[in-house]
Image: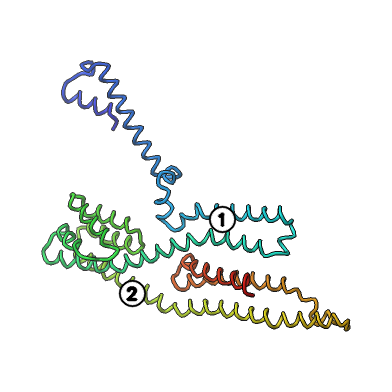
Amino acid sequence: MRLQDIMNNYFNRTGFRKQDISETQISELERDERHIIDKIDFLRKHRIGVNRLKAHPIEVLTESPQNILIVSLPLAFVVLIVGFFTLVTQYGIGIIFTSTLIDDILVISVLIATVPLAILEFQYSRRQRNLETSLPNFFRDVAGMNESGMTLPNAIHVVAGGEYGHLTPYIRRLDAEMSWNVPFVDAIYRFGSRLATPLAERSVDLIAKASKAGGDVSEVLRAAAVDSYEFVTLDTDRRNNMLIYVIIVIVSFFVFVFVIAVMTGTFLRTMAEAGAAVSATGTAGAGAFGASIDMFFYTRLFSHAAMIQGFFSGLVAGQMGEANSIAGLKYSVIMLVIAWVAFRFFI
């Protein structure tokens, strides 16, 4: 309702007429109304979209791991384009085929794009596991307090004095909201939205709907505690059972790199040296023996194969171990760097 409508209602109830207020007072009220509306519109615009990013860049970029791509992808693209044109300008287009510098630029660009995402995804996954591990204990303790005769606000207040790891600050904020007479359903929905994990949102939705339906809240809390405990247990068992396959993927990468290193450092190099020696003697068929082996070409080809396998093997390991390919970026980054360093400086 606008300020003008409020004023008209007030005049109708009290019997005053609009003419009883001077034009100066009316203009001041209208100016204050416009000022308040403009301020509300300004705050609303700065809570969404690009304006929110400008006002709170760190908060926006870190609230979800994928948001960091807003910065990392353009930065990686700029590094790639600038590096490519710098090399081509200085050395010509042939630098693409005769040097590994362009490979270095490409690897650095990939790292710029993926390392921030890998770090934030690792932190987000660890936070989510810590919160979901403590959630069953919280629901069970509140249900026990409620069954003992305490009201729900008192039960949450008592439980808020305990220690639940990373979940403790969220419980204390829930307790503070309920102490301000916020309805339990609204408070528990806000609690779930702040946690922002699939398990928390599912459990909160179950509790809120049961409370609205008039059921026994303590029984619902116990059911949510059992459900969340089983969810956490199954997730832990799945990760433990799939750990062996993650290890197999990682070991396979190292075996691949080791085999290529041995083949490049011994077999191909020996064949090239033997072919060059035979070619120097002028013996017929020297080229077929190995004199035409281009060690730079094969070494670069194998390095590309190792880096590609390392990066995508990490994504496969993340999908198998944590049911999330983005979670495998930490393995991808590590194996990509190992392959790059091994072929760039040692092989």
Q: Residues within 10 Å of mark 1 (few under 14, many from 20)?
A: many
Closer to the camera, 327 or 12?
Answer: 327
Instruction: Give the spatial CA distance, label 1 vs label 2.
Output: 39 Å
Label 2 is placed on what type of residue? Thr
x, y percent for residue 123: 40, 63
- x, y (%) of residue 292? 80, 76
Can you say which quadrant of the picture contains the N terminus? Answer: top left
Looking at the rendered structure, the number of numbered marks drawn on it comes to: 2
Say if residue 216 shows up in the picture.
no
For badge 1, the amino acid type reads Ala
Q: Give the structural element (helix, strand or loop) at label 2.
A: helix
Instruction: Give the quarter of the image for residue 120.
Output: bottom left
In the current view of this chain or complex, which residue is farthest to the left?
Answer: 149
Residue located at (59% from left, 63% from top) = 107
Instruction: Give the label on residue 253, or none.
Output: none
- Vertical order, 129 against 287 (above or below): above
Note whether residue 144 is visible.
yes
Are there few (<14), some (14-19), or many (20+) residues within 10 Å of tag 2?
Answer: few
Task: Label 1, secondary structure: give it.
Answer: helix
- Image point (46%, 57%), residue name: 66
- Residue denoted by label 2: 233
Residue occupying the point 79% across, 80% down: 290
Disc nearest the viewer among 1 and 2: 1
- Tell me the colour scheme of the image: rainbow
Quarter occupied by residue 131:
bottom left
Q: Return the x and y of residue 329 as percentages of the image width and height.
A: 50, 66
Mark earlier in primary sequence (1, 2):
1
Residue 108's x, y, as percent?
58, 61
Quadrant position of the C terminus in the picture: bottom right
The residue labelled by disc 1 is 76
